[in-house]
Image (cartoon, coloured by chain):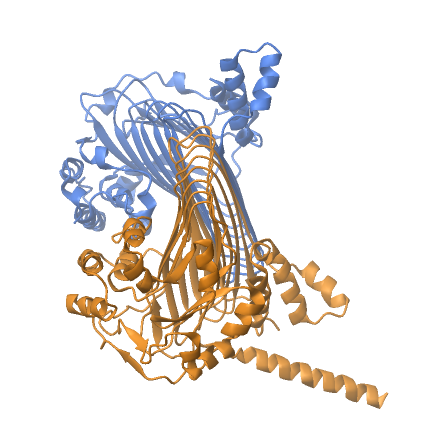
Amino acid sequence: MNQLALSPFVESQLAALPDSGIAWLDAARREQLAAFAEAGLPGTRMEAWKYTGLRALGQRRFATGDAQAAAREVDVSAFALPGVDGPRLVFVNGAFRADLSALDSLPQGVELRPLSQALREDAEPLRFLLSRHEPEQGDAFVRLNAALADDGVLLKVAAGAKPAAPVHLLFLGAPAEGDVAWHLRHLIELGEGAELSLVEHHAASGEQRHLGTACADIVLRDGAVLHHAIFQDAAEGASLIRRSKLQLGARAAATLHVLELGGALVRHDLQAELVGDGAHFTTRGVFKVHGRQHVDTQLAIRHRALHTASDSIWRGVADQRGRGVFRGAILVAPGADGSDANLGNKNLLLSDQAEIDTKPELEIYADEVKAAHGATVGQLDERSLFYLRSRGIPLPEARALLTAAFCRAVLDDLPNTALREHLAGLLTV
Amino acid sequence: MSSETTASTNTALRDNAEVAEALGRHYSAGFVTEIEMTGLPPGLDEETIRQLSAIKREPEWMTEWRLKAYRHWLGMPQPDWAKLKMDAIDYQAISYYAAPKKKPKSLDEVDPALLETYEKLGVPLHERAALAGVAVDAVFDSVSVGTTFRKQLAEAGVIFCSMSEAIREHPELVQQYLGSVVPPGDNFFAALNSAVFSDGSFVFIPKGVRCPMELSTYFRINAQNTGQFERTLIIAEEGAHVSYLEGCTAPKRDENQLHAAVVELVALERAQIKYSTVQNWYPGDENGVGGIYNLVTKRGDCRGDDSKISWTQVETGSAITWKYPSVVLRGDRSVGEFHSVALTHHFQQADTGTKMIHIGKDTKSKIVSKGISAGKSNNSYRGLVKVEKGASGARNYTSCDSLLIGKQCGAHTFPYMEVKNPTAIVEHEATTSKISDDQMFYCRSRGIREEDAVSMIVDGFCKQVFRELPMEFAVEAKKLLEVSLEGAVG
């Protein structure tokens, strides 16, 4: 046990093991909780958490789940996104809200419902996914999530189905009587040749200091295509710890656009396993931190099959006392010949109290490979600033303009035009 | 017609024979000099350290310094974060002191067998020193046996001697600087070295002096079961310049031999230190048996403003290479450089790179790393560029390229960038690829043999680093890569 093992945080989470009435699920949950309690929160000596200290979080207590979640007043229309008009699934403080969701007219071949409902109806098909163990080092939150998550999103697209309208997943934090912790587990599967546009949206309906954890397993069968936009604009005091794991079959293609704008402590482990020949993975992401925000993105792309390709462009901006952390790891496994991997991470450091820590990694075990990465940390180009100022634009505006342009690059190839313009607008402020 | 055929067959046969010979990649420096050794029995405790210190006739403060480091070491766990597969080291099975029995007073008295060893290694002390104008402080296992050109250096005010001698003759300098860059408790292997270091080189360049020649040390690990723990300390006072060359070969052994050295460089105002290494220790055989464990702490401290420290290394030997020659850029406008070629073959493993810690204003650092992996080896670059809050105007440029030769090797890059100053510019770029088919085709179509083509391309790949080496070393390094890469293709 390490020093943090008995921290108030861990203690506060041990109390609330959900009871599903499903023997195998409850057994798996107990096991995961015991493992979490034993290991506690990871310390900064652990490589994966080197730049994200959890000491402060470890000292806090959270109630598990918000008992009043179903009654919280939320104006869901305030969170509508242009260009995103398909089915909608809404969670408030970790609880599914049927009254706010729009699930009436699901397109052909799309199964979309809360996990809790699926478990009640027939848990057996989910058994494999929910009881398997992934004892990766340092994933205390994956264990905690496995133990305590009793809801989430279950989304399946049948083979060949290509619903036109994007699916909107909305996770809202709302003020509650105390600090609440909620845990969600998402299972998303695209059948062979299916195509889906998905928007994952984290937002705040009022100021609060909740903790949310989310683990998503996203499986793309052969030839499936996923456009996934993640827009995180959580409350200023919120802590949000997520892991998204994608698995790409042969010729499958996933494109992710990620915007990390809100939250106090934000961590996202984004892992892609390219297991099928010819799989293609693209990420575009930006994190902007100010105030005392801490945003940590851990991107890991693993090429495990022939002729797979990955292309990642990430931008970071740190202002005031913010801290941005980025790790972009590329693994090319033995035999994964023909892999083509590219990763770029550029960062702007705008204040002398801010900090950027970046760590691009290459781990290559095959020789028919093209792999490259680059990372920079710097500031706005003096000449560009001078150019704008010489044309009468005041310094603060010139700075904002250049910063927005710097971030915007990651949205350039977002196919949903209306959504792209909306998100680009948010980057300007 | 028929004679032509015969001729080409002969050429083919000869080529085959060359390839077959190259495939064996015999370690040309793999021999053992038979000299009677006296030393301490294997084992390590406080008594061993006291004995070691007594044999070396060290003053009381030195013994205490060692003991303190030893006590610290006892409480430290061996680190395991590197990307290395390593058998556990039994520190009690190592003999911590070995020395040639005869103590020569000058080169003439040096054991002929020993001189022959150097001869085989290509370090004929007299001739080479005379021809190349290089003063050689050759370390044969744990005791310095000969130092040349001392007089000429002394006239310039330069002190170049063994560490043992420096402890006896220049205690005030040693006390002031030893452990000031790499403290005894810095890390596991540095602590071990501080406790049991056997010998090494001591260089002191006084204020304003430009060292009249390049200084060089040839290290050899000889006696079986003897870990060699060198300790090198180089001090360049205000405005002083020095270029230091370190080269290593070790005889063939089947057992893993531990080498945990510490090198400390101190550059005061406007001083410049250039430290070059060609490391060709026994890498183990083609099945991964034997070979040296090279676990080294090397660090330079740009203590004064406008100082400069530059590391250049060519690493082709050792079963395991684990080291990060670093520069602490404390003085304003100080400059740190790191140029490295690391080649691994067969079952060799390397986890090497550098750290550049920017503390002073307008400090600059440049990192150029070239990794070449062949056979079943693994080669990692691991580097840290850290810009502290006060280091305004800091600038770093890092470029890491890896070349893969063969299907079963690995090449990895782990750069860390930590920036806390908004006026700093830090850049990193890395690529990994194999030798391009186009380049190979071009060479082959012009009648260049595959091996020669590979060697040419690799040489070009490394040119940026070789350029930084002193001339003699550059030639040696190029040859070394050629020899090391033979058998890697075809």
Q: Nearer the viewer, residue B251 or A230?
A: B251
Name, please, the residue furthest toward the right: B1
> In the picture, which chain is orange?
B
Side (left or right) of B185 relative to B439: left
Residue A417 in picture, x, y percent from top left = 57, 25
The residue shown at (53%, 77%) is B25
The residue shown at (40%, 20%) is A79
Name, please, the residue furthest toward the top: A392
User: Residue A355 sits in which quadrant?
Assistant: top left
Q: Nearer the viewer, residue B204 or A258?
A: B204
- Whether A298 is drawn above or below A264: the answer is below
Residue B209 in picture, x, y percent from top left = 47, 49
The residue shown at (30%, 60%) is B169
Residue B296 in picture, x, y percent from top left = 37, 60
Residue A352 in picture, x, y percent from top left = 39, 26
The residue shown at (23%, 48%) is A25
In the rendered image, is residue A162 in sight? yes
User: Residue A325 sits in which quadrant?
Assistant: top left
Q: Nearer the viewer, residue B180 or A166?
A: B180
Which tint is chain A? blue
